[in-house]
Amino acid sequence: MRIGHNLTMLNQDALYDALLARDASLDGRAYVAVRTTRIFCRLTCPARKPKRENCTFYNDVSGCLEAGYRPCKRCQPLRPAGALATRMQSLIDALEAEPAKRWSESTLVELGHDPSTVRRQFREHFGVTFLEMARLRRLRLGATRLRDGDAVIDAQLDAGFSSDSGFRDALARLLNVAPASLTANTAVRATWIDTPIGAMIAAGSEDALHVVEFYDCKDLPRELRALGKKHGPISLGENRITASLRDEMSAYFEGHGRTFSTPVNGIGTDFTKTVWRALCDIPYGSTVSYGELAQRIGNRKASRAVARANGSNPMAIIVPCHRVIAADGSLSGYAGGPWRKRWLLDHERRVAGSG
């Protein structure tokens, strides 16, 4: 199985030897993330070397940031080299000074930068654009606050909803309806749940949860509209099902909840529901390939159909489609974004290892 950013277990051990030797030939090609300090460094960092079991190696800074690590202040792994260093470093310094700031292309223009040039330069040097780097810094800050015991709402740094009215307007846009139509008390109610990796929208009746997705998932509008066609209009608010999910999601992200008992009833064919049930049998902290999942449902030739069913899962995290990876061990597509898939897998492996 591959871990980190396409680095094999053998390479991980070899990279630890390179870390001990402070091998400068790997500078910019590999980074070490230390589980106990939540910091990532260059392999040449002069700091005291961590134990092997506390190290994970990545081949670009985006993997470190997506996994929730912050850059070391001693070796400064985000400091670029070369002729572009000064301009890029000014943006990095600004980001480090205000990690919670919401950056945009218009902000870059105001500072005299060309957004397309910045995007290209950061992707070439760091494997991630500047705006993506800024978002990941906000998410890491949110995860830290949640881990340190702050209220979940304080960890909502990138969700896009700061009030019920803001959520109502966003949901109305997703459903393509007037905001006023969401105020009625209907059978299906929708609410949002804050998490360290962005807000999730949950919709359920009194009997079961029907949809739970990250708010920026491209499939969410289609799923909500299909739900409305089958179960009737959707209104704002919480019921016992969404309240149950909120508690279980909080436990999951805090690291002491590994399973979900909230009843679910997603819209799908008999085949897709068979695949979704098989997903729920994948142990916490582990992964399987699409081919392995096809074998588990008794149809080894159906790996492509299994992949489509996996992609149509409307129950993010609860039905753990993020635990399915490609046959070569690499991370394949995920509706919530590959960076979230990597975060979830790292989170589960970390919790499973500590338990």
Image (tube, grey):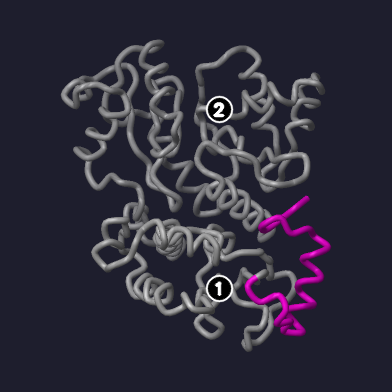
Q: Residue at x 50, y 77 (%)?
A: 79
Q: Is residue 257 magenta?
A: no
Query: SS of the residue at dot 2?
Result: loop
Q: Is residue 3 magenta?
A: yes
- Residue 241 lies, in percent from the top left, at 41, 29
Quarter location, residue 136? bottom left
- Residue 84 lies, in percent from the top left, at 46, 75
Give the vertical position of 344 relative to 292 (above or below).
below
Q: Residue at x 62, y 49 (%)?
A: 345
- Residue 90 lies, in percent from the top left, at 37, 76
Quarter location, residue 190? top left
Residue 313's disc is 2
Q: Is residue 84 left or right of residue 326?
A: left
According to the image, label 1 marks what residue?
39
Callouts 1 and 2 close, C-beta under 8 Å? no
Name the quadrant of the C terminus: bottom right
Q: Residue at x 44, y 33 (%)?
A: 218
Give the vertical position of 329 relative to 58 (above or below).
above
Q: Amino acid at mark 2?
A: Asn
Q: CA distance from mark 1 to mark 2?
A: 34 Å
Q: Is residue 245 visible?
A: no
Give the vertical position of 328 relative to 218 (above or below).
below
Which stretch did the figure color magenta? 1-28
